[in-house]
Amino acid sequence: MQQLLWKFWREEDGQDLIEYTLLITFIALATAALVGSGQNAIRAIWTTSNSHIIAANSAS
């Protein structure tokens, strides 16, 4: 059992897989944060556009 644990500790076969998984996780979290922060800007654009459409409809 001790040899198995020592072999597991010394081998680096899965190291690349773990690093790529951490990188993908970081990218996913950063993307989620950017989308969340951009939500207010999108809402403001939508509200402004809607106001202009209503004003144009009322003018005609």
Image (cartoon, grey):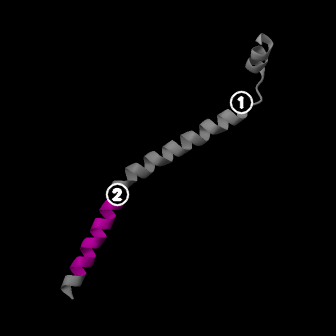
Q: Nearer the viewer, residue 18 or 7?
A: 7
- Magenta span covers which residues? 42-56
| Depicted 35 relative to depicted 1: above or below | below
At 26% from the left and 75% from the top, the residue drawn is 52
Quadrant for the N terminus in the image: top right
Drawn side of residue 7 relative to residue 29, left or right? right
Drawn side of residue 17 relative to residue 56, left or right? right
Could you tell me residue 5's position as x and y percent?
74, 16
Residue pushed farthest bottom? 60
Q: Are marks 2 and 1 in contact (CB under 8 Å)?
A: no
Give me the disc on residue 43.
Answer: none
Drawn side of residue 16 relative to residue 55, left or right? right
At 21% from the left and 78% from the top, the residue drawn is 55
Amino acid type of the residue tagged 2 in the rendering: Ala
Residue pushed farthest left? 58
At 43% from the left and 52% from the top, the residue drawn is 35
Q: Nearer the viewer, residue 30 or 18?
A: 18
Could you tell me residue 36's position as x and y percent?
40, 50
Drawn side of residue 19 relative to residue 42, left or right? right
* Residue behind mark 1: 15
Circle 2 sits in a helix, a strand or a loop, which is it? helix
Quadrant for the C terminus in the image: bottom left
Give me the disc on residue 41.
Answer: 2
Q: CA distance from mark 2 to mark 1?
A: 40 Å
Circle 1 sits in a helix, a strand or a loop, which is it? helix
